[in-house]
Amino acid sequence: MDLGLKNRVAIVGGGSKGLGRACADSLAQEGAKLVICSRNAQELDQAAEEISAAAGVEVLAVPADLSKLEDIQTLVKRTVDHFGRLDILVNNSGGPPAGRATDTTEEVWYQSVDMALMFFIRMSREAVPHMKNGGWGRIVNVLASSVYQPIENLVTSGVTRMGAVAFAKSLADEVGRDDILVNNVAPGYLLTDRMMHIFEVRSEDTGANVEDLLQAHSATIPVGRLGRPEELGDLVTFLASEKNSYTTGATILVDGGVVRSVM
Ligand SMILES: NC(=O)c1ccc[n+]([C@@H]2O[C@H](COP(=O)([O-])OP(=O)(O)OC[C@H]3O[C@@H](n4cnc5c(N)ncnc54)[C@H](OP(=O)(O)O)[C@@H]3O)[C@@H](O)[C@H]2O)c1
């Protein structure tokens, strides 16, 4: 299947590792030119080199903190200055800090809103005018399964990302006639650095070893294992492509069946 991504220009947030890196690899394999972004400039440069060498496409590394408006504005400006266009946004970044409903502080709430709600709003607001200029656009937001069911000690994720779902649906209404489609993906448990860190912390807390914890957790997932980042990356690439021409405003789980709701 030709996804029609050759020479399209995409920004991939959090592109140096984990889910963002998997999205970047997958888009690059389909011929898209990329701008990848994360805070650690050294890791980002290395990722850009590796992606470019593997796929033979141009990859520009722009270090930025995606929880800050000025950094987002600079990222979009540098993309358009360099490539002359912007077609695709993969809105992915670090997750919000842990927190419980009863004791999360004001400071952590505001930090979470910047990281996991305003991030999606700001990226879209800055990018959509360029997509309209090009007469085409695709936006894919990487959220979490917390939009379907709470994750313990992550009230910050559910609350902010439910806002992102509502925002994406309204945005999809507003830009559909410009051939700009907006969708969300909701990962369950995919094995990235962040996910590994969660299991390491659990291991320290409980004294159980990490392998045993991973195995016990796999047993709770209908497909019997944690996911691989590329299993999300390939879906994102499809949603970001010309072959996706009629799905917009949707939220798609990538969770091996872990969420228990019927709808
Ligand atoms: N893995 C899963 O199964 C899973 C499940 C549910 C939700 N999610 C969500 O999916 C997103 C990606 O998760 P992941 O597992 O891929 O995490 P990861 O392995 O820790 O990778 C996160 C990436 O985002 C970058 N990043 C973090 N904070 C940033 C910021 N403020 N500005 C710019 N870049 C930033 C990191 O680089 P720097 O640190 O250098 O900035 C890195 O490139 C997170 O929002 C996470 O909550 C993941």
Image (cartoon, rainbow, N blue to C red):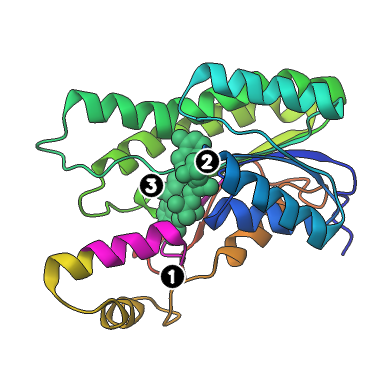
Farthest front residue? 42
Distance between the alpha carbons at the discs numbered 3 and 1: 14 Å
Identify residue for label 3.
147
Identify residue for label 1.
257
Residue at the spot 54% in from the left edge and 33% down from the top edge: 169
Q: Quadrant of the N terminus?
A: bottom right
Disc 2 marks a residue whose amino acid type is: Asn
Q: Which mark is residue 242?
A: none
Q: Give the crowd class for mark 1: few <14, some 14-19, many >=20 residues within 10 Å.
A: some
Is-magenta flag for residue 259? no
Farthest left residue? 102
Distance between the alpha carbons at the discs numbered 2 and 1: 33 Å
Is the C-beta of the residue carrying label 2 under 8 Å from the nearest atom of ligand 1?
yes
Is-magenta flag for residue 185? yes
- Where residue 175 sits, quadrant-wise, is top right
Identify residue for label 2.
40
Say which element carries label 1.
Answer: loop
